[in-house]
Image (cartoon, rainbow, N blue to C red):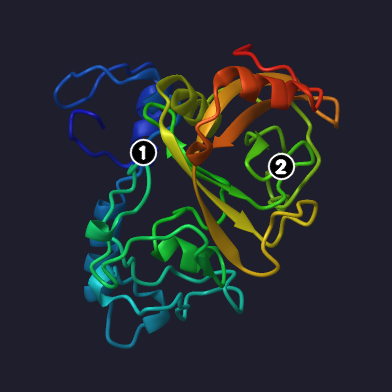
Amino acid sequence: MPCGHNFCLKCFEKWIKQGGHSCAKCRASIPPKMKCQPRINLALVAAVRMARSKSTPSGADPSKAYNFVHNQNRPDKAYTTERAKKAGKANAASGKIFVTIAPDHFGPILAENDPVRNQGVLVGESWEDRLECRQWGAHLPHVAGIAGQSEYGSQSVALSGGYEDDEDHGEWFLYTGSGGRDLSGNKRTNKEQSFDQKFEKLNEALRISCKKGYPVRVVRSHKEKRSSYAPESGVRYDGIYRIERCWRKAGTQGFKVCDTCLFDATMNLPHGLVKHMVTAQGHCLSYRS
């Protein structure tokens, strides 16, 4: 809760269904977004699991014990535990985070944030996969293509062939937002769009970065097969881009998508030239929602 109090998720959902609009302890109002998307206190969850594991009888199955691993105690590579349901890295946990940036850090990762090598993350650096990329802070989510928060902005994006409407032109690219697909049940890899995307959640984070002019780190994955700028293998950090425009348009599958145009920040191109280059490809730049 924003007021600092914690509640059982089931009790919280029951309280909301009963018409509760304020904290049951201090009567502080509950934000509308918290009502529909309650935040899980992961630190508290880990503490509860550890307490339960300590009280488990000695003859109980040890695989049901949950252990929270601090960053300094994690191995240097992604790893799996006995709890993993799938082989390989499908259920792997992240290895040690080597840089000292905060999760909401905007811009490049400098030498002062790199106590291991004292050089920062350089443009052109590459890693074996998204999990290793995460360890160096270039793009923290190992699945999602957008890193950010709807209230603050987007810190990074990953080009990995997620949507048909993506276009990669090297120094600039069109990036399709998230959402619009039914991922319920066992459809976690469904690529068919079934409803319109909206500027909310991670898409809103991109729009905030657009309006504020925040720098966005960009990584490209070998999984983007349609781009000649993608690496042949692994994941590569391609530096800082800035968002020129965000808008909604009809996508190739007939539903609206949130489109974002990003430009290499090192080019320092004037707005008029940027607009000319993009419109020459048949795109209209605007802030339409």
Residue 18 x/y as whole percent = 39, 20
Residue 79 visible in rendering: yes
For the C terminus, the image quarter is top right
Mark 1 lies on residue: 39
Q: Label 1: state its secondary structure.
A: loop
Residue 196 visible in rendering: no
The residue nearer to you, when weighing 164 against 187, is: 164
Residue 238 x/y as whole percent = 54, 53
Q: Is residue 72 above or below residue 20?
A: below
The mark lying in front, picked from 1 and 2, is 2
For the N terminus, the image quarter is top left
Residue 83 x/y as whole percent = 47, 75
Q: Are marks 1 and 2 in contact (CB under 8 Å)?
A: no
Identify which amino acid the numbered label 2 is placed on: His
The residue nearer to you, when weighing 265 against 54, is: 265
Q: Residue at x 49, y 65 (%)?
A: 125
The residue nearer to you, when weighing 180 against 167, is: 167
Q: Is residue 84 above or below residue 18?
A: below
Mark 2 lies on residue: 169
Identify which amino acid the numbered label 1 is placed on: Arg
